[in-house]
Image (tube, rainbow, N blue to C red):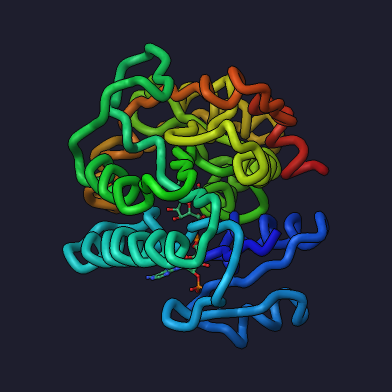
Amino acid sequence: MHVVVSGGTGFLGAPLVRALLAGGDTVTVLTREPSRAGRMFEGRVATATADNLPDRFDAVVGLAGENIGRRWSRAVLQRLRESRVGPTRLLREAAEQRGAQVLVSASGVDWYAPGADHELDENAPPGNGFLARLCHDWEQAASSSRLRSVALRLGMVLGRGGALARMLPFFRWGLGGPLGNGRQFVSWIHLQDAVSLILWALRNAAVRGALNATAPEPVTSREFARTLGRVLRRPAFLPVPGFALRLLYGGFGKVLLESRRVVPRAATAQGFEFGFMRLEQALREILVG
Ligand SMILES: NC(=O)c1ccc[n+]([C@@H]2O[C@H](COP(=O)([O-])OP(=O)(O)OC[C@H]3O[C@@H](n4cnc5c(N)ncnc54)[C@H](OP(=O)(O)O)[C@@H]3O)[C@@H](O)[C@H]2O)c1
């Protein structure tokens, strides 16, 4: 299969590209920096920019987008949108024109309205905050009547890098702890499972529409901190006050305090098997090996 991967240089994209290559697929990485991408994969991938996509390909995975985990200024909000909605629409149109069969496009669990502690599956209602609206428009841009389209509603992806790398220094110094009152649910997925889920969605013709990409057992922020502390053998009790998060990250700080207990109903109902069901198991693999 010839797969075009946008964002193939990223935290999730790079291991996906390596897994596709290992499985014998042909990969074109759609990137803003083709020479860097070429070096990254030692010349084993073709590279393209948005205006010189290959004439034919079979599948597309859309993972590009400005990083969300930072202070949201007005300019950042604009870049978060502009790096996702328009480029995804163009990618979907190119895929339709070139006869591709499937488009798997990233979205996020922030699509859902935050809830207290009830489980949110793919039928749960949408939210209406900035990220929820962005995810909605992003998914709309990827949706098609001419090819199979899958919207991957990702939780926090845990691996060596990403969000975990940003919190680790605090936890290693014994300064980590729950966010706010710690009662909000955090939906997470191990990087290896996120990659496997994308490969499964690409190859499984029955999978279409919204697909929660989260481990079956989301945890509260308090439980997350406690588990990370246990794995690192460090105390992890110091709560990060909500006002500090809002001060530091603006709108993103508010999102960190919202609860979304998202469960992967569609994936498990269709037979996908997670390698990492429990948070402690996932964190041990990443941090202890
Ligand atoms: N990681 C998570 O926990 C998580 C959770 C929920 C949703 N997601 C979504 O899943 C996708 C992949 O996540 P990730 O963590 O792998 O992302 P990432 O590493 O932060 O970025 C992926 C790629 O996006 C491209 N990119 C970055 N800024 C851009 C900009 N301003 N304009 C256009 N392209 C830009 C870069 O590719 P080039 O430099 O090669 O162009 C980068 O390698 C993202 O869209 C993200 O929002 C991730």
**35 horizontally vs 139: left or right:** right
37 relative to 105, above or below: below
20 relative to 43, above or below: above
Locate the C terminus by quadrant: top right
**203 horizontally vs 59: left or right:** right
Whether residue 177 is visible: no
Q: Please tell me in which quadrant of the rendered image residue 282 appears.
A: top right
Instruction: Depth check: give the residue in front, 201 or 241.
Output: 201
Instruction: Depth check: give the residue in front, 151 or 286.
Output: 151
Write the residue at 75% across / 35% down.
284
Q: Please tell me in which quadrant of the rendered image residue 26 appears.
A: bottom right
Furthest residue in direction bottom, as rendered: 35
Write the residue at 36% across / 20% down.
123
Instruction: Depth check: give the residue in front, 289 or 37.
Output: 37
Q: Where is residue 135 in the image (x, y as percent from the top left)?
A: 31, 45
156 relative to 10, above or below: above
Locate the N terminus by quadrant: bottom right
Write the residue at 69% across / 36% down.
283
**115 horizontally vs 268: left or right:** left
Q: Position of residue 11 (x, y in %)?
A: 59, 58
